[in-house]
């Protein structure tokens, strides 16, 4: 389980201030007491999915790893959220709103460690 602290919410809100969809996802994460995996499930349900598999976040990580680990990817939350949102919107079957919890997960792990 990966969570974010109340202090991190402020920082992430500031970094994503120009992205209304990401801010909405942050609201969901906050409602889930900072739990990124729980928030991903809620976002999927809100997108109209009727059933959520317990390994959703693991599947999301596997699916989006190649985007996050591109050579030119910067460890900046807005850049990562934008790239992953675009990737998910291109027909992945995952709603683009999942880009925010995934990207925060990567930033918390650090891009370098995540991409090993």
Image (tube, rainbow, N blue to C red):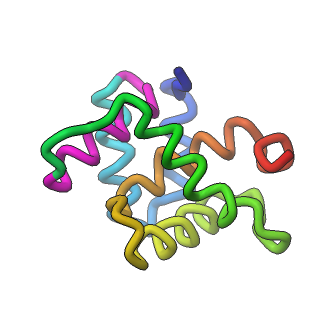
Rendered location of residue 29, percent (x, y): 37, 36
Residue 77 part of the magenta segment: no
Residue at 60% across / 49% down in the picture?
Answer: 62
Rendered location of residue 6, percent (x, y): 48, 25
Please say if 109 is above or below 101: above
Tell me: 56 left or right of 110: left
- Closer-to-camera residue (32/56): 56
Please say if 33 is above or below 27: above
Rendered location of residue 12, percent (x, y): 54, 46
Magenta-tinted stretch: 33-48
Tell me: 52 left or right of 99: left
Count of numbered tags: 0
Most common SS among magenta residues: helix
- Closer-to-camera residue (24/93): 93
Residue 35 part of the magenta segment: yes
Q: Quadrant of residue 48?
A: bottom left
Quadrant showing the C terminus? top right
Residue at 45% across / 33% down in the picture?
Answer: 36
Q: Quadrant of residue 33?
A: top left
- Closer-to-camera residue (99/7): 99
Residue at 76% across / 60% down in the picture?
Answer: 69
Residue at 43% across / 27% down in the picture?
Answer: 34
Rendered location of residue 81, percent (x, y): 54, 62
Please say if 4 is above or below 46: above
Tell me: 42 left or right of 93: left
């Amino acid at each position: 389980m990966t969570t974010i602290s109340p202090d991190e919410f402020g920082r992430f809100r500031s970094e994503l201030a120009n992205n209304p969809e990401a801010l909405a996802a942050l609201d969901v994460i906050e409602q889930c007491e900072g739990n990124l995996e729980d928030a991903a499930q809620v976002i999927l349900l809100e997108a109209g999915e009727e059933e959520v598999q317990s390994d959703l976040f693991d599947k999301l990580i596997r699916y989006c790893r190649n985007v996050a680990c591109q050579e030119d990817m910067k460890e900046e939350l807005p850049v990562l959220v934008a790239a992953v949102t675009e990737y998910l919107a291109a027909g992945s079957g995952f709603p683009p709103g999942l880009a925010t919890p995934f990207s925060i997960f990567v930033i918390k792990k650090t891009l370098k460690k995540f991409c090993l």
